[in-house]
Each structure stands twice: as C-alpha cells, then as structure tokens.
Amino acid sequence: MLIIGEKINTVNARVRRAVEERDGSYIQHLARSQAEAGAHVIDVNVGGLPGVEPELMQWAVGVVQEVTDLPLAIDSTDPQTIHAGLAACAHPERAWANSVTLEKDRLRGILPLVCEYGCTVVALCIDERGVPGDPAGRVEVAKHLVDEMQRWGIPLDRVYIDCLVQPVSVEPEAARVSLETVRAVQVELPGIKTAICLSGISYGLPARRALNRAFLPPLLEAGVDAIFLDPLDRALGTVLRASRVLFGGDPLGLEYIAAYRAGQLE
C-alpha cells in the first residue's frame, strides 16, 4: 500500500502564502518531512491561483526535487498545469498525473500527456454529471475510464482509480459508499488499483484528525492500494502501522516492531 503525502497543497493558507511568495524553504521542509515520515510519493498542488498555476507548478516541482528524489504527483484539474509539472520532473516516467476524469476536456488534455511521459495516472470516478452517489455508479464510471486508458494504449498497471470520498458532514453515508466502491472495483475490474484521499471524509467537521484516523483501518481492510494522507500525523501513522499488522500487510508485525524500536509509534 502506497502513501502519498498530501501536505503541499495551496488549500492550506500557509502553503498558499509560501507559494505566492516563492518561499522555497517552507515547501522543501514539507517535502523533506513527508519523505522522512515514510511517504512513497509527494503530491504537489498549487491550485487556486488563476493564470499562473502552470508557472507555479514548475517552480514547486523544481524546489521539491532539490530535497527528495521521491516520485511526485502533479495534482491539478488543469491539463496545462499537469504538463508544466511533468515537464519539470527529472524523471517524469516515475511521476503521477493527478488527475483525470471522464469529462471530455480533461480526458483530451491529460491522457496524451500520460502517453507522452509514460507516467502513472490517477483517474477519478467523475463524469460530466459529477460524482455518482452510489458504488454502482462509481464503478460504471471506473469501467469507462479503464476503457479510455486502453483506447490510448496506457498500461493498466499505471492506472489508479480514485474511488472518491465525500465529507460525512454533507453525505452521512460517504464512508460506506467509498468502502463499497473500493471492494466493487476489485471485483468488477480485477487487477486495477484503487486510491482514496483520506482527509476528504472529515471536511467541515471539528477534530478532523480523529475522523481521518477512524476511517483508515476499514480502508486498509477493504484493500485500497494507495492513500493520500498526512504522513506528519504521528497518531495516524501509528494507526496505519497497527492496521497493516491486523489486516495482513505486515506479516508477523516486523515493520511494526521496527517502528516501535525506532520510537515512531504514538
């Protein structure tokens, strides 16, 4: 199971200010800290700054690569920004394009880049009508997305289907729907990998970290392949390591024991 560090995102006011002011040291601190905390991929999102997002993405990728050689997830709804980020990667074939949907503009703008750079792609279960409210609807979108990948000749082992998480503050059944979608994709699309953005579950509620931590074990039990999360949340990391022992991801608890001896458990 892969951990994608989510901390470099301009939805956070401190990160937004650092990006606007070209404060590379703060962005590098976040990248380095997440790498040291065990992230396998570093997500980079500089959205919300119209007209300059491609330039800012190119800058952010450059400063992050100065302190880590982990793969980067170039995170944007804008194909031009994803292009700028991939072009700035020293090894774009190791990068992730995050993300494509069934919306025509994003399909036409992003899938050619995935082919050109040979990178991994995150595909969200969203079509022109938005986010389906039930697992069956999301799986149907996922099937169409996989068909598009095959039509473009993209190897399916480089595709992650984002099963989506809506806030429980808006949709009380959000956790159940996401978990059932993860399981259904495994059945209906065998061999296709799944992804989830953990923190989406808690948006709009207080003590968000408590909800994120509670949602993590059932996601691991469901067999999700990649999770966007905060690697710097020490208690969340403890829950992650413990859950991997309980659900077979860490046989005999060897990684758990090593983390305990290294003082990494809460």
Image: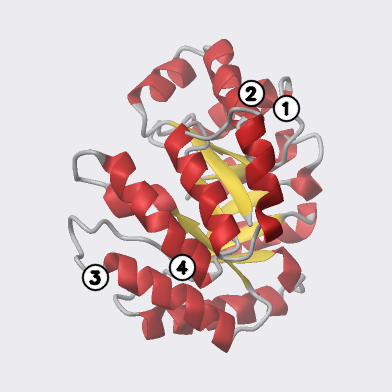
Q: CA distance from mark 4 to mark 1?
A: 28 Å
**Image vertical order of residue 111 relative to residue 88, above or below:** below
Q: Between residues 56 and 97, which one lies in front from this camera angle?
A: 97
Q: CA distance from mark 1 to mark 2?
A: 6 Å
Residue type pointed to by label 2? Arg
Q: Earlier in the sequence, mark 1 or mark 2?
A: 2
* Rendering quarter of residue 160: bottom right
- Name the residue that disc number 4 marks: 163
Is residue 29 visible in the rendered image? The answer is yes
Q: Between residues 156 and 107, which one lies in front from this camera angle?
A: 156
Residue type pointed to by label 1? Thr
Quick one: SS at disc 1?
Answer: loop
* Rendering quarter of residue 70: top right
* Labels 1 and 2 touching (C-beta < 8 A): yes
Q: Residue at 26%, 56% (x, y): give it.
A: 167
Quick one: SS at disc 3?
Answer: loop
- Name the residue that disc number 2 marks: 32
* Labels 2 and 3 touching (C-beta < 8 A): no
- Name the residue that disc number 3 marks: 173
User: Residue 79: x percent and y percent?
Assistant: 56, 50
Quick one: SS at disc 2?
Answer: helix
Q: Earlier in the sequence, mark 2 or mark 4?
A: 2
Quick one: SS at disc 4?
Answer: loop
Mark 3 surroundings: few (<14), some (14-19) or many (≥20) residues within 10 A: some
- Name the residue that disc number 1 marks: 68
Q: Earlier in the sequence, mark 4 or mark 1?
A: 1
Q: Residue at 64%, 59% (x, y): give it.
A: 121
Tally the marks: 4
Q: Name the image quarter holding the N terminus.
A: bottom right
